[in-house]
């Protein structure tokens, strides 16, 4: 879900891997959406019932993933690409798994789910979101209302990663390395 610490954790992982000498790069679907001129997309854009915007979101996510995979193909040794996106549904994760499973040489895929239910942390994270380009010239109260509506849209379709999902992915893609944390 949004504002649970995915980007924060991802950036820390990039720094740590770089410290260890392993090239790492972050590929953020939200940044790509903003780059495409959709920085001020309101919560309606994130409504799963809005089929036009859902198609755009899926396209942006898969383009971001394709950029990550292209970057990995150029790697000569250890490398880690981090797909920073809100992969809240089984269907989205299946698409990600299927796309990664087609890669040769194979890639190892890890889904990291950041679960946060601490209201104080969430409120702080929501406030930090108001500093990004989505809410650049927006009144703070209006921005917060819109962001909370966006979170609600994601909560309506959110499906946690389960052991069954992992088992199914492993059975479907025999030679594919897949884990979740």
Image: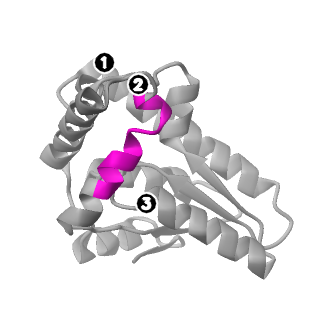
Please report the residue visible at 16 percent of the width from the left and 42 percent of the height from the top: 152
64 relative to 121, above or below: above
Please report the residue visible at 65 percent of the width from the left and 66 percent of the height from the top: 14
- Residue 133 horizontal side relative to residue 145, left or right: right
The numbered dot on residue 52 is 1
Pair 2/3: label in front: 3
Q: Name the element at disc 2.
A: helix
The numbered dot on residue 6 is 3
Q: Quadrant of residue 52?
A: top left
Residue 117 lies in magenta, yes or no? no
4 relative to 22, above or below: above
Tag 2 and tag 1, C-beta contact below 8 Å: yes
* x and y percentages locating residue 168 in the rendered image: 30, 69
- Residue 83 horizontal side relative to residue 143, left or right: right
- Residue 141 horizontal side relative to residue 4, left or right: left
Tag 1 and tag 3, C-beta contact below 8 Å: no
**Foreground pick, 63 / 174:** 63
Q: Quadrant of residue 117?
A: bottom left
Residue 130 lies in magenta, yes or no? yes
Q: Which of disc 3 and disc 1 is earlier in sequence?
A: 3
Please report the residue visible at 58 percent of the width from the left and 54 percent of the height from the top: 102
The numbered dot on residue 56 is 2
Tell me the CA gap for discs 2 and 3.
Answer: 21 Å
The numbered dot on residue 128 is none
Quadrant where the image shows the C terminus: bottom left
Residue 70 in sight: yes
Give the magenta range.
124-135
* x and y percentages locating residue 89 in the rendered image: 27, 51
Q: Name the element at disc 1.
A: helix
* x and y percentages locating residue 164 in the rendered image: 23, 73
Tell me the CA gap for discs 1 and 3.
Answer: 26 Å
Q: How is the image coloured?
A: one colour
């Amino acid at each position: 879900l949004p504002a649970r610490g995915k980007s924060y954790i991802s950036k820390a992982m990039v720094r740590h891997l770089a410290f260890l000498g392993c090239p790492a790069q972050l590929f953020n679907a939200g940044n790509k959406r903003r780059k495409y001129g959709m920085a001020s997309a309101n919560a309606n854009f994130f409504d799963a019932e809005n089929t036009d915007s859902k198609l755009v979101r899926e396209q942006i996510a898969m383009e971001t993933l394709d950029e990550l995979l292209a970057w990995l193909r150029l790697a000569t040794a250890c490398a880690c690409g981090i797909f920073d996106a809100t992969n809240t549904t089984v269907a989205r994760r299946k698409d990600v798994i299927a796309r990664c499973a087609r890669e040769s040489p194979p890639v190892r895929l890890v889904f990291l789910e950041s679960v946060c239910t601490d209201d104080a942390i969430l409120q702080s994270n929501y406030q930090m979101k108001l500093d990004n380009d989505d809410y650049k010239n927006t009144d703070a109260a209006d921005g917060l209302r819109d962001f909370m509506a966006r979170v609600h849209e994601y909560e309506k379709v959110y499906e946690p990663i389960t052991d069954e999902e992992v088992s199914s992915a492993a059975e479907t893609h025999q030679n594919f390395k897949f884990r979740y944390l």
